[in-house]
Image: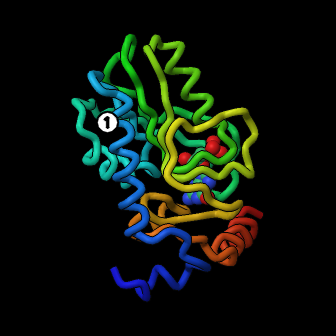
Amino acid sequence: MEANAKMYGDIQEVLIRREEIANAVKMLGDMITRDYEGKAPVMVCILKGASVFYVDLLREIDLPVTMEFMIVSSYGKGVASTGNVRIRKDLDYDISGRDVILVEDIVDTGLTLSFLKKMFIERGAQSVKIATLLDKPARRKVDLKADYYCFTVPDAFVVGYGLDYAERYRNLPDIGILKSEIYEKRSELELKTAF
Ligand code: 5GP
């Protein structure tokens, strides 16, 4: 996709280009392959945001991995975390005794992943690690560190490579900061229609 495609008009600044993403994902895949040698981890994709990262990462891992998908929501349609984690689709199989890798798009407040990590430990996983594409440490509300991450991002709302705003921009090949007027415009509209 050309960098002047329509979607880029809503982007304030491209932060990470597709080539950099591909390199980082490859390095992460190699690292997981080394760390989990002799094991068969269950890779849990947290839909929908992690989907693009997940399918790219899996193909860089040379291990007999199992694919699992979960849908959780903590944001609704806005840009601020509510802190309420709701499981809308659970795993298909039991993970007790298994090595689990939770694959997420971004760790922001950390609320979603600390909730999920605790839940997987309670379900009897042998180990639970977190692999995230992006880490936004500035807004952390709980003491949670990603075991694997590709990039650290500033305190801004980013979209692209799976990350959305109101279900849009997931198919942007690069990662960029969304212009604030896009979500401010929408909030005004929502306020007007709510009253
Ligand atoms: P946390 O529970 O760590 O606050 O939030 C995790 C979820 O919030 C992520 O999986 C993602 O869906 C959403 N999120 C947090 N920051 C951003 C951001 O900058 N852009 C987008 N598109 N989603 C975000």
x and y percent of residue 156 in the render? 68, 64
- The quadrant of the image that shows the C terminus is bottom right
Q: Amino acid at mark 1?
A: Thr
Q: Residue at x 48, y 13 (%)?
A: 123
Identify the element where label 1 is drawn: helix
x and y percent of residue 153 in the render? 62, 59
Q: Which residue is mark 1?
A: 33
The answer to whether residue 154 is above or below residue 104 is below
The answer to whether residue 37 is above or below residue 3 is above
x and y percent of residue 85 in the render? 61, 35
Query: Is residue 23 in view from this perspective?
Result: yes
Q: Is residue 166 left or right of residue 92?
A: right
Image quadrant where residue 22 sits? bottom left
Q: Residue at x 47, y 35 (%)?
A: 88
x and y percent of residue 142 in the render? 73, 34
Q: Is residue 23 left or right of residue 155?
A: left
- The quadrant of the image that shows the N terminus is bottom left
Q: Residue at x 38, y 50 (%)?
A: 27
Image quadrant where residue 12 sits? bottom right
The answer to whether residue 123 is above or below residue 107 is above
Image quadrant where residue 79 sits? bottom right
Q: Residue at x 28, y 41 (%)?
A: 61
Is the CB of the residue bearing disc 1 within 8 angstroms of ligand 1?
Answer: no
The answer to whether residue 54 is above or below residue 19 is above
- The local crowd at label 1, few if under 14, some if 14 to 19, many if 20 or more residues have their Cα within 10 Å, is some
